[in-house]
Image (cartoon, rainbow, N blue to C red):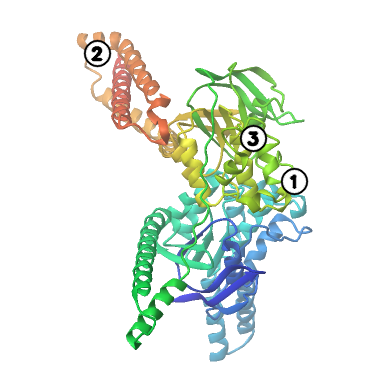
């Protein structure tokens, strides 16, 4: 059943048409993703559906009684309210329904005989409470705040929070309300990978309403969306499935469009030749044919959007790029350790992703490599020929008063003006002649991100430090960036929550785990996620180990009591016990050797796992199995010996 519908909606700013007669329906429980280029009108579309903006023409309607919650990119919160009070606003409808039920129940309790009308009202109020999530919803606030990583600021005023924290508070407010429809504009901004993973699972497994997601997080789209909308040139195209299905279906649509345009041009060419051969006096049939030709001529050809083509010249860095030994970093102007005893060796071709919660020290590490943050302990060595390029989150290196052209041609003198004209170079980044004349201050967030990339890649750096490079980039530019980075001939350290980018680009992951600890994982994001899942299984097993050990020991004690009249170990078992520790050492050494082989960066070159990886993993599991079996046998022999 349809819960929200837009009919013939149009919106323009001046002569710029964003939406032209768009119609759309959202059904109960449906999950819809929205993609498109920066400035195409995605956020405007969401605002109109939410009622936050009025369309020029057309209407938007919601089913009677349906509640719609909207998360904007720049949420507005009451700065004088605490985080808890702000989030609890999302429960307003539930609190109203519960209070109504309590009031009518109290009234009935005072009456000697409750009327049928009063009982019906009580039943209706109870039904409304159930529809809004049940009778125990107050605990939702703490649960959602904890999962979004802001439970520790629950008593602070929202006016004292950072921009990222405010976004999380606004998202929590929407989630706890359990509305019938959630319209979320870039909900993963300022979230780390683990929090995004929780949000993804919440939307798939827990939330029962309908969702519309405006997002560039393609991993999220693939796992959540039933349908994907593309806002393009005033139109909204609908595709079944998530991001991967959207790419495939769009390619088919573009191929059909290209064939149609080719047929139109061929038809026009044929008709023009016919017209040149005909006399001036024409029959009715001839006039009809002329009309068809004129109609075909007047069809507007599909507009080709500028494509982003990233490229860079990379200087040779040599084999050794970076060597960190025992590095320690503290919070600037504080005593808390972000890193302790951190070692890292990078060679040419290493592309490492950096993950971890906000505030763990990811950006601080990049700034330390630039010399902007002092190292508290340890040594840091860059290769002699290493040339570092840095892209910061805020794009602060851009001068707002400079033109786009001068930003690249003037601020980056390494652009070869004889072989690469700055104008042609900027066109690769979708900046045409008019855009190149603009001041940086006049650019959108996405355009500034593209310009910062253009400026960075013109520097011929062979070690790129990228801090959230996917922020503000549309999916087309992200795809171009990934294509470039996956074949980049230098080395890379990238801080990002974009799991799709990590999976395509990286050869390893550095995971900041808090308390100064960082773990390096071999392979791209999926290999990292699998390793983390195995670690979690081991932690759960270890947590249950005391009980299992107690049971096992009780069983062994019973066996020992039953066999107390027999010798504890035979001669063969004693010889086996005497030599088993050497065998365990050999087995663990063999497993460590296979682990080192699996960590070889060459196995993950180009962002893809080598075909050898599954076989190596199988050997590793087998080696670990041998070590575990020997250890279990040693425990068994030692326990048997103890009965002597």
Any mark on residue 354, and which? Answer: none
Q: Secondary structure at mark 2?
A: loop
* Element class at badge 1: loop
Residue position for label 3: 363
Disc 2 and disc 1: Cα gap in Å? 82 Å
Crowding around mark 1 (Cα neighbors within 10 Å: few <14, some 14 to 19, many 20+) is some
* Precedes in sequence: disc 2 or disc 3: 3
Q: Earlier in the sequence, mark 2 or mark 1?
A: 1
Count of numbered badges drawn on the protein: 3
Residue 16: name its quadrant.
bottom right
- Quadrant for the C terminus in the image: top left
Which marked residue is nearer to the observer: mark 1 or mark 3?
1
Binning the other alpha carbons within 10 Å of mark 3 as few (below 14), some (14 to 19) or many (20 upward) gives some
Res. 148 in view: yes
> What residue is at 44 percent from the left and 40 percent from the top?
504
151 horizontally vs 462: left or right = right
Q: Residue furthest right?
A: 80
Q: Which is more toward the observer, 384 or 107? A: 384
Where residue 429 appears, as percent x and y from the top left, is 57, 45
Q: Label 1: which residue?
A: 400
- Disc nearer the start of the sequence (1/3): 3
- Residue position for label 2: 569
Q: Position of residue 149 (x, y in %)?
A: 61, 47
What's the distance in space between the residues labelled 1 and 3, CA to CA?
23 Å
Tell me: residue 349, above or below residue 124: above
Marks 1 and 3 in Cβ contact (< 8 Å): no
- Which one is in front, 582 or 468? 468
């Amino acid at each position: 059943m349809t819960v929200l519908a837009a009919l013939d909606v149009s919106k323009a700013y001046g002569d710029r048409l964003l939406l032209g007669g768009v119609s759309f329906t959202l059904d109960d429980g449906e999950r819809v993703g929205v993609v498109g280029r920066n400035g195409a009108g995605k956020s405007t579309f969401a605002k109109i559906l939410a009622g936050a903006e009025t369309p020029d023409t057309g209407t938007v309607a919601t089913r009677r009684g349906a509640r719609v919650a909207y998360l904007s990119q720049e949420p507005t919160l009451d700065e004088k309210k605490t985080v808890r009070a702000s989030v609890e606003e999302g429960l307003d409808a539930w609190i109203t329904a519960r209070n109504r039920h309590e009031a009518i129940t109290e009234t009935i309790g005072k009456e000697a005989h409750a009327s049928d009308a009063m009982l019906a009202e009580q039943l209706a109020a109870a039904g409304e409470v159930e529809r809004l999530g049940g009778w125990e919803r107050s605990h939702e606030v703490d649960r959602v705040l904890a999962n979004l990583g802001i439970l520790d600021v629950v008593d602070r005023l929202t006016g004292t929070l950072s921009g990222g924290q405010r976004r999380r508070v606004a998202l929590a407010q929407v989630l706890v309300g359990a509305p019938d429809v959630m319209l979320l504009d870039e909900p993963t901004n300022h979230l780390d990978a683990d929090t995004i993973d929780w949000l993804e699972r919440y939307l798939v497994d827990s939330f029962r309403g309908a969702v519309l997601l405006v997002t560039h997080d393609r991993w999220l789209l693939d796992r959540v969306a039933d349908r994907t909308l593309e806002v393009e040139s005033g139109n909204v195209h609908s595709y079944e499935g998530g991001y991967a299905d959207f790419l495939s279906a769009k390619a088919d649509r573009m191929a059909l469009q290209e064939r149609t345009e080719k047929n139109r041009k061929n038809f026009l060419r044929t008709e023009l030749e016919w017209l040149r051969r005909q006399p001036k006096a024409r029959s009715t049939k001839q006039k009809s044919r002329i009309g068809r030709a004129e109609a075909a001529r007047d069809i507007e050809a599909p507009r080709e959007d500028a494509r982003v083509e990233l490229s860079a010249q990379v200087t040779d860095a040599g084999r050794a790029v970076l060597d960190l030994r025992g590095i320690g970093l503290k919070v600037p102007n504080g005593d808390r350790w972000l890193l302790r005893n951190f070692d890292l060796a990078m060679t040419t071709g290493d592309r490492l992703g950096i993950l971890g919660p906000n505030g763990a020290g990811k950006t601080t590490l990049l700034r330390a490599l630039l010399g902007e943050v002092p190292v508290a302990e340890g040594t840091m060595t860059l290769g002699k020929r290493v040339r570092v390029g840095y892209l910061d989150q805020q794009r602060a290196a851009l001068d707002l008063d400079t033109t786009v052209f001068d930003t690249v041609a003037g601020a980056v003198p390494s652009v070869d003006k004889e072989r690469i004209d700055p104008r042609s170079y900027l066109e690769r980044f979708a900046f045409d002649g008019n855009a190149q004349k603009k001041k940086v201050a006049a650019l959108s967030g996405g355009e500034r991100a593209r310009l910062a990339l253009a400026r960075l890649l013109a520097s011929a750096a062979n070690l790129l430090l990228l801090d959230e490079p996917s922020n503000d980039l549309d999916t087309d530019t992200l795809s171009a960036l990934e294509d470039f980075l996956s074949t980049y001939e230098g080395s890379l350290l990238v801080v990002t929550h974009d799991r799709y980018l990590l999976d395509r680009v990286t050869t390893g992951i550095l995971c900041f785990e808090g308390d100064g600890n960082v773990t390096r994982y071999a392979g791209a994001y999926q290999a990292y996620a699998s390793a983390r899942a195995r670690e979690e299984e081991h932690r759960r097993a270890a947590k249950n180990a005391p009980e299992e050990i107690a049971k096992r020991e009780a069983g062994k004690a019973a066996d020992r009591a039953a066999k107390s009249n027999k010798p504890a170990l035979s001669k063969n078992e004693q010889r086996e016990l005497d030599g088993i520790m050497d065998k365990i050492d050999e087995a663990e050494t063999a497993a460590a050797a296979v682990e080192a082989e699996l960590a070889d960066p060459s196995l993950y070159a180009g962002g893809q796992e080598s075909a050898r990886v599954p076989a190596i993993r199988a050997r590793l599991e087998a080696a670990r199995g041998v070590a575990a079996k020997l250890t279990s046998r040693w425990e068994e022999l030692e326990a048997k010996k103890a009965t002597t």
